[in-house]
Amino acid sequence: MRVRVPVFLRITAAAATVGALEAEAAGKAMEPDRQMNAIRRYPIIGAVIIQMIAALVVIALKTVLAGMIDARTFFWGALAVQGLVAAALTRALGLPVWWAWIGLLFPVAVYLALAAGSLPAWPFGVAFVVAYLFFSNTAGERVPLYLTNRTTAKALLTLMRERGATRFIDLGSGLGGVVRALDGDGRVALGVETAPMAWLVSVLLSRIKRRGTILRQDIWSADISHQDVVYAFLSPEPMPELYEKARREMKPGGLFVSNSFAVPGVTADEVWELDDSRKTKLFIYKVNGSQSRPAD
Ligand SMILES: C[S@@+](CC[C@H](N)C(=O)[O-])C[C@H]1O[C@@H](n2cnc3c(N)ncnc32)[C@H](O)[C@@H]1O
């Protein structure tokens, strides 16, 4: 029996084969570490490669199951296998969990878009604008919006209490959850955020809950000179420059805390590994008068 494979699966598989052949022909096998860094830095590349690999799995299954399964069943099975393999590979590569959801749902989304025929364009336009207003820093700063979890916010509170710190700033405060969690009981918490919708939502929530202050300000122009704890949950990209800003501007003994992303070439004074599902690491640097030193 002939089983029809959806067009997009054929295209991705063909692209995967061509890509592999090109790489082989050029003799340009990247070292695994560099490859992984590139994928973590540009997850979209990883996501495309992963979909191609998943498509190859589907094609292999098609060959194995030829004549054993009817076309309709195979088609739905193929969508499920494509999504599940993509999600599993995404997690195996260590990409954030929301990329796994994208990988899982992508085949179905493509099918629905193709099956829907001619849709009006405006819902896509509106969705794009809303997404842009939340995620506008993804393109420029390479920092998407993802949020500090409750365990990490509690750890930051413990840190502030332990060190007698009262002034806190979240550089790139997203929806402001950390700022609201830390403000109060003698602590003053501030957040700066430039993505318009994230800023608006966080300002409204802070006003409603009367906790914390959110400014529409770029992290690079934020005044951190009076802060006891400067917190950032960004990406690997801005870390070297941000650490330099902390060293230049923070008062002696201040703590620069980065969630998940260490400052390259600098050994943190402390690393807290938290007991949450993602095993969050807080890299703590005591800047100015610090023991933070170049990594060995
Ligand atoms: C990963 S989210 C973290 C949100 C929040 N700090 C938290 O932990 O829940 C990073 C945030 O930084 C913001 N951001 C990135 N670059 C920025 C910049 N140059 N100035 C202000 N905000 C920025 C993004 O818009 C995003 O909301």
Image (cartoon, rainbow, N blue to C red):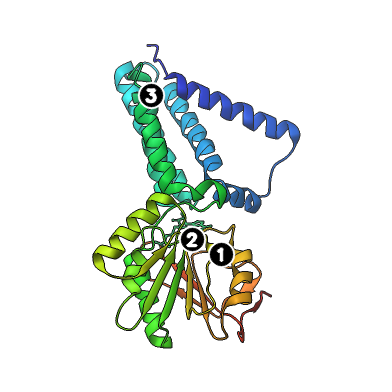
Indicate whether 138 appears above or below 266.
Answer: above
- Can residue 84 be seen here? The reply is no
In x, y percent, where is residue 195? 45, 52
In x, y percent, where is residue 125? 40, 31
Query: What secondary structure is marked by label 3?
Result: loop
Is ligand 1 closer than 8 angstroms to the Cβ of mark 3?
no
The residue carrying mark 1 is 221
- The C terminus - image quarter: bottom right
- Can residue 201 be seen here? The reply is yes
- The N terminus - image quarter: top left
Q: Nearer the viewer, residue 219 or 4?
A: 219
Query: What secondary structure is marked by label 2?
Result: loop
Quadrant of the image occupied by residue 280: bottom left
The residue carrying mark 3 is 121
Indicate whether 39 appears above or below 245.
Answer: above
Q: Residue at x 34, y 19 (%)?
A: 115
Quadrant of the image occupied by residue 151: bottom left
Question: Closer to us: mark 1 or mark 3?
Answer: 1
The residue carrying mark 2 is 217
Marks 3 and 2, how far apart at CA:
33 Å
Q: Residue at x 64, y 70 (%)?
A: 244
* Amino acid type, residue under disc 1 in the picture: Ser
Is ligand 1 closer than 8 angstroms to the Cβ of mark 2?
yes
* Amino acid type, residue under disc 3 in the picture: Ala
